[in-house]
Image: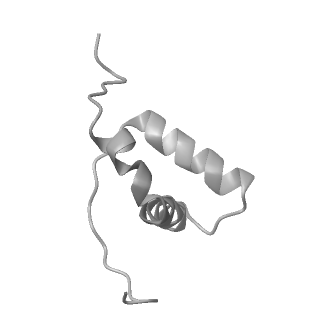
Amino acid sequence: GSVGKKVEIAVKVNPDNIEMVDKIVDEYKIKDRSKAFRVLLDYVIDNETEWDKMFKRKRCKRCY
């Protein structure tokens, strides 16, 4: 990969997602939200065998 080179993208998330990321940043003394998201993405990359479980399921945490 392109280690060290970062590309800025815009991602839409729900307010509770930001609350979660801010909690992670605070609790684990991570530099900022961007670093926390990169750590989460690296975890997903390292756990490709779990992708079907994560992405094939239909889920809607905000549907009523």
Q: Which part of the image, by quadrant, shows the N terminus? A: bottom left
Q: Residue furthest top?
A: 64
Residue 18 in picture, x, y percent from top left: 47, 44
Give the residue drawn at x 28%, y 48%.
12
Total labels: the figure holds 0
Residue 24 in picture, x, y percent from top left: 63, 51
Identify the image's colour scheme: rainbow, by chain, secondary structure or one colour: one colour
* 51 over 57 or under it: above or below: below
* 45 over 25 or under it: above or below: below
* 64 over 45 or under it: above or below: above
Q: Residue furthest front?
A: 49
Q: Is residue 27 left or right of residue 50?
A: right
Q: Is residue 60 left or right of residue 40?
A: left
Nearer the observer, 41 or 29: 41
* 1 over 26 or under it: above or below: below
Q: Is residue 16 left or right of residue 28?
A: left
Give the residue drawn at x 72%, y 62%.
29
Give the residue drawn at x 28%, y 55%.
11
Quarter of the image where one finds residue 7: bottom left
Q: Is residue 29 left or right of residue 39?
A: right
Q: Which part of the image, by quadrant, shows the C terminus? A: top left
Residue 16 in picture, x, y percent from top left: 46, 34
Give the residue drawn at x 53%, y 68%.
35
Residue 26 in picture, x, y percent from top left: 69, 53
